[in-house]
Amino acid sequence: MRVTASKFRENLYGILDQALETGVPVEVIRKGKILRIIQEAKPDKLSRLKKRKCIVGDPESIVHMDWLHEWSELK
């Protein structure tokens, strides 16, 4: 949605509420320049996880490990 600065000032909260509901950015024209108001994107939960070192050593050594002596159908 594109509006002039005076139209934006007239209905500031209505325009902002509409932008929140629809997700459509608001473009305000002021002195020939365009200012864009958009919702802030929430970061993904996985991107906020701290990186941790869980494997000590070479991870490739786990792939080729023989676990047959550890597993039994009787256990």
Image (spheres, rainbow, N blue to C red):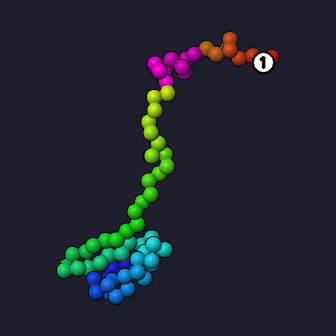
Q: Hey, which quadrant is residue 39 in on the image? A: bottom left
Q: Hey, which quadrant is residue 10 in on the image? A: bottom left
Query: Residue at position x 21%, y 75% from top?
Result: 33
State which quarter of the image contains the C terminus: top right
Query: Residue at position x 25%, y 74% from top?
Result: 34
- Please state which of residues 32 and 16 is positioned toward the viewer in this rendering: 16
Q: Main secondary structure of the magenta part?
A: loop
Question: Where residue 60 sits: x, y (%)?
Answer: 49, 21
State which quarter of the image contains the N terminus: bottom left
Amino acid identity at mark 1:
Lys
Q: Residues within 10 Å of mark 1 (few under 14, many from 20)?
A: few
Q: Which residue is mark 1?
A: 75
Furthest residue in direction right, as rendered: 74
Question: Where residue 46 sits: x, y (%)?
Answer: 49, 46
Is residue 61 rendered magenta in the image? yes
64 over 18 or under it: above or below: above
Q: Is residue 51 left or right of residue 6?
A: right
Q: Which residues are magenta?
A: 55-65
Query: Residue at position x 49%, y 49% from top?
Result: 45
Furthest residue in direction top, as rendered: 69
